[in-house]
Amino acid sequence: LHLCDLAGSERLDRSNATGVAASETKSINKSLSSLADVFTAIGQRASFVPFRNSKLTYLLQPALSGSGKMCMFVNVSPTEASVQETLCSLRFATKVNKCELGKAMRTVETTASCKTGGATKRVHDAGCGGRPSSSGGRCVKRKAG
């Protein structure tokens, strides 16, 4: 399970950010741009998806590669001063909504086990990449049969 607060794009001229805050704003905008590029490639079923363009997209690759589920919330402001940012957010949401990742699947692999004296099945939830999660994710070992 990945939970990401993408903080939204911010316009430097509106926020009047300087120094570290301006640098953070630029990084957030770059990550969102890279995420948009990934969704565009997925939506067009491109042979190459640019997951390595940012740390955000690189970390989300297992969830966005077709075996995971994704839900996205877009927050917008009803104020007149935020019309441009709201429109940008809604355009981004439209781009994301056009993408189909495919049906989420559960992966089951069978391995030989010396300790149990027989074959075991390892059941992986979608997105774990076939390996136990370090965060206590659900990868369960069961006796085969």
Image (tube, rainbow, N blue to C red):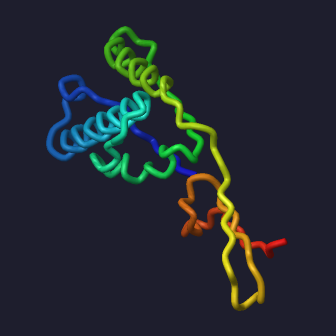
Q: The C terminus appears in which quarter of the rendering?
A: bottom right
Q: Quadrant of residue 79?
A: top left
Q: Quadrant of residue 94?
A: top left
Residue 106 rendering spot, x and y as whole percentages: 67, 53
Q: Residue furthest right?
A: 145
Residue 111 rendering spot, x and y as whole percentages: 66, 76
**Residue at (15%, 38%) from the top-left corner?**
18
Q: Residue furthest left?
A: 19
Residue 138 vs residue 141, the one in the foreground: 141
Q: Quadrant of residue 121?
A: bottom right
Residue 84 rendering spot, x and y as whole percentages: 31, 14
In this picture, is 49 found above or below 130?
above
Residue 128 vs residue 143, the one in the foreground: 143
In this picture, is 10 found above or below 125?
above
**Residue at (68%, 81%) from the top-left corner?**
112
User: Is 82 situated left or right of 140 in this image?
Assistant: left
User: Is 124 situated left or right of 7 in this image?
Assistant: right
User: Is 145 situated left or right of 53 in this image?
Assistant: right
How many labels were placed on the picture? 0
**Residue at (57%, 35%) from the top-left corner?**
71
**Residue at (80%, 75%) from the top-left corner?**
143
Residue 117 rendering spot, x and y as whole percentages: 77, 89
